[in-house]
Amino acid sequence: MAIFCVPQVSWAQDIIRIHTGLGAEKPRIAVADFAPRVDPAKNHSALFTQVVRDDLQFSGIIELVSPSFYPPQAPSQPSELRNLTWTDAPANANMVAFGNLTESTPEVAIQAWLFDVRNPSSQPVVAKVYRGTPTDAQVRRFAHQFADEIINKLSGGLPSIAGTQIAFVSSRTGTKELWLMDYDGANQHPLTSLRSIALTPRWSPDASRIAFTCFKPMIRVTSAQICMYSMDTGKLVSFPQFKGSNSSPSWSPDGTQIIFSSSMQGSPELYVSEASGGRPRRLTNSNGANTSATWNPKTGQTVVFVSDRGGVPQLYSMNSDGTSVSKFDLPDMGYVIDPAWSPNGQILAFSWRRPSGNYDIYVMEAATSKIVEITRDAGRNERPSWAPDGRHIVFESTRGGTRQIWSMLADGSQPHQLTTTGHNESPNWSPK
């Protein structure tokens, strides 16, 4: 593969815009305060409003109008909407989201609309009614659903992420366990209590299972093995133990196979097995260690992985059957780890420590090997994982002093710290 230099800023931005849609013109959307119809609904009205605003702001495809520019009277139903008060300065909005909440002991009911205020005769772009238990968690879910509806409509049907989750590893209970949180960092809770070490969680394509690395006693020795957690049952499900050290599982796009690193026959090589762990088959045969394999999610034909067969960890690709191995010739030396494909199968994110620098996150256009650096000299930045919308990346970073989970847009902007307690690592974004 040809060698390319890291591109200049303007060209680098073009790579991101072409493959993520982040460069498109953004509609200006105002989210009016949702009106409580009864006093008990006041807190949940404020919560619903704020979560919708946060989701839209973080989407990367919307310009959220600051509430300081809103007219004094917020509509609670379509008959109260006065278009000119929103289209005129200072709001200059293209669209307005608004609605109301009614709450009683057994139920909260939310009416929510999105209108194109520059097309007064149009029907609502989104019109929804949500009913459920009057809890913070349920109101947050409804807010995520409404934001997802808006983003879905405005992005031409591309996946939205407000309802997605992030699996990660946390040591806050004393040992490294598998944890889960909403995409925005809310609702953090443990999934496992192995009282051992969990690492490298990976969602199955249907989001029903999480494969991860765990440490289990095996013939009086605690060795790394592949573990499997079922989201349907809330429990670990059986997966065979193999000799040696077994780690870094990754799913095929159709969910029928798992590729992982194993030393069952000596040095760490890549193996592929059925999703149940059956029929493991060796794919690589080299003098170095091979790990961190990941399938191209669109084609299923190409696997990218890390190998130190050349002396230091570098990025390689091969066919999914192990043939046609080739090395990506990056424009500098250094350690490359943690490759992750974007959902469209056109960009790779990875962590790279260049000779004179820090571990930072880079994205590379796979077809040309052209590279963009999206974090720069702010602690160690590792383990990138793409959101299903292809516009966001979650990663671990020590930029705040301790190892925590962060998310950002794929161009490196809008970084958000998601965890604060304990040490947190190895994030993986759910596919839906």
Image (tube, grey):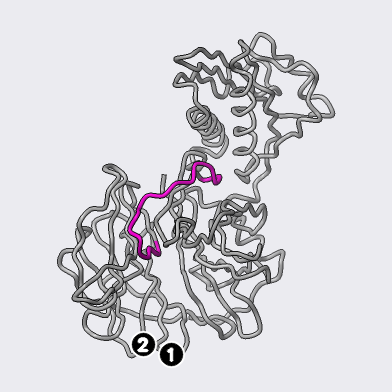
Q: Which residue is mark 1?
A: 310
- Give coordinates of residue 359: x percent, y percent: 59, 74
Residue stretch rendered in magenta on the structure: 183-200
Q: Residue at x 52, y 38 (%)?
A: 156
Q: Quadrant of residue 428?
A: bottom left
- Give coordinates of residue 388: x percent, y percent: 46, 49
- 347 horizontally vs 220: left or right: right
Q: Which mark is residue 288?
A: 2
Tell me: residue 41, above or below residue 416: above
Q: Secondary structure at mark 1?
A: loop
- 384 horizontally vs 246: left or right: right
Residue type at mark 2 is Gly
Is 338 a magenta residue? no
Q: Secondary structure at mark 2?
A: loop
- 248 horizontally vs 34: left or right: left
Task: Look at the numbered discs 1 and 2 and tell me whether their residues touch, using CB distance below 8 Å.
Answer: yes
Q: Residue at x 71, y 66 (%)?
A: 9
Residue type at mark 1 is Gly
- Give coordinates of residue 395: x percent, y percent: 54, 60
Q: Residue at x 53, y 73 (%)?
A: 369
Q: Residue at x 46, y 82 (%)?
A: 313
